[in-house]
Image: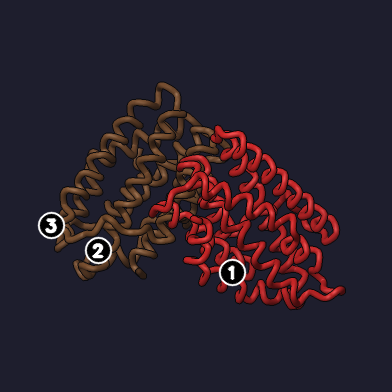
Chain colours: A brown, B red
Amino acid sequence: MAAHDHSLVRNAGPLWDEATRSPFLDALAAGSLSADAFRRWLGQDYLFASRLMAFQAILLSKAPRDCHQPLIEGLAALDCELGWFESHTTRLLVDLDIAPHATCRRYTDFLIRCAYTEPYPVPLAMLFGVEASYLAAWSALLPSGPYAEFIERWSSADFAAYVRLLGALADRNPHEAAQEHFNEVLGHEREFWKMSWEG
Amino acid sequence: MLHDVLWRSNLHLAHSCLAHPFVQALGEGTLKADLFRAFIAQDAFFLGAFRKAYALALARSDETESITSLYELLGGVLEELKLHRAYATERRIDLEILVPNPACRAYTDFLLRTAWHTSLGEAIAAMTPCMRLYAYLGRELASKCSLHHPYRRWIETYSGEEFGRLARRLETLLDRAAADNREIRDSYRYALQCELDFFSGVLGI
């Protein structure tokens, strides 16, 4: 099942489009995005990913046995992702030792707080929201121009398969608060793209 | 002392809070009643998180002195919540149906993330600015507070000796639990920024 057919996505209404489309992505696909804006986004995305690691680790510690494999594979993939950022700082001219933007901080405070305070199906639905919206945002772009490498990286078949697994896990572990938190994730995604575009 | 260094290095944020239109109107007694009601409702939600943060810090403390301090501070926030419930009854505020505004949610998410996830020192550094700031605002506003001021009770609570004593108690804990490093400075500064945003959140600006 494609992510956009998932009930959490359908029931999110217009929030889904707001979280997956942005002038930042349009400019990136058109090749007109400035290198400075791209580097600014990369730096914040790295901080986001490093805090997402904590969120996923806490979720893993609370989730039942049948959720472990995809979550562990997700953590391993995230470790590779952080390693990719760290090994490309020189080529990409990105400074990773920066302070989080208020938008990045609000998003990650929300994620980690919920990982502790909500029962595991809620952060599970939230993780699906984080990854499915990210995949949808990048998959809508044609991999061409100066940013083709990055578009391909974040719309890969492996990533899509992982997102499908997360969607299936969310289905098998429903919770009455899942939709509300899924929607909040989408709101934060929208703000993150907005921050990336507006600086 | 660390608490003094942190307060002084962020004094500009405390001054911005004092100069904030919400705080100025509250101090002058010209704040519209519905805005005060909105503030009390958001603050009650915030205090619910603050109470949990104290409880988590208490559970993670080993020294009797710290445990005793946190026990007292937890009692202090429970008293503050009683006062909010009294305001809610008097001014017909339904605290049960409250939806926090984005600034309030950002602050409580930050507070609870630090309380659950970071070192005890960082968690205390996230909590201290609220206490010190309100003691400061209370003292500053008390000079203009007449006998018939509509928000006299609020100003007296935060300018009072008891609240000042609790703020100092938390600062003593901060000095014991935290080192002067980037995380602690960041936690303290961001909490004060959240305080400033909280006032704007009530005004919807």
Residue toward you, A31 or B84: B84
The image quarter containing residue B83 is bottom right
Q: Which chain is home to disc 3?
A: A
Q: Are marks 1 and 2 on the same chain?
A: no
Q: Are marks 3 and 1 in contact (CB under 8 Å)?
A: no
Residue farthest to the front?
A: B1
Tell me where residue B196 appears, x and y as whole percent: 56, 66
Q: Nearer the viewer, mark 3 or mark 2?
A: 3
Residue toward you, A39 or B115: B115
Q: Which chain is home to disc 1?
A: B
Residue shown at 53% from the left, 43% from the top: B115
Quadrant where the N terminus of chain A sits is: top left
Q: Which residue is mark 3?
A: A91
Tell me where residue A84 appears, x and y as whole percent: 19, 46
> Which amino acid type is marked by label 2?
Phe
The image quarter containing residue B133 is bottom right
Q: Which residue is mark 2?
A: A38
Report helix, strand or loop for mark 3. Answer: helix
Tell me where residue B70 appears, x and y as whole percent: 63, 42
> Which amino acid type is marked by label 1?
Ser
Q: Which residue is mark 1?
A: B200
> Which amino acid type is marked by label 3?
Arg
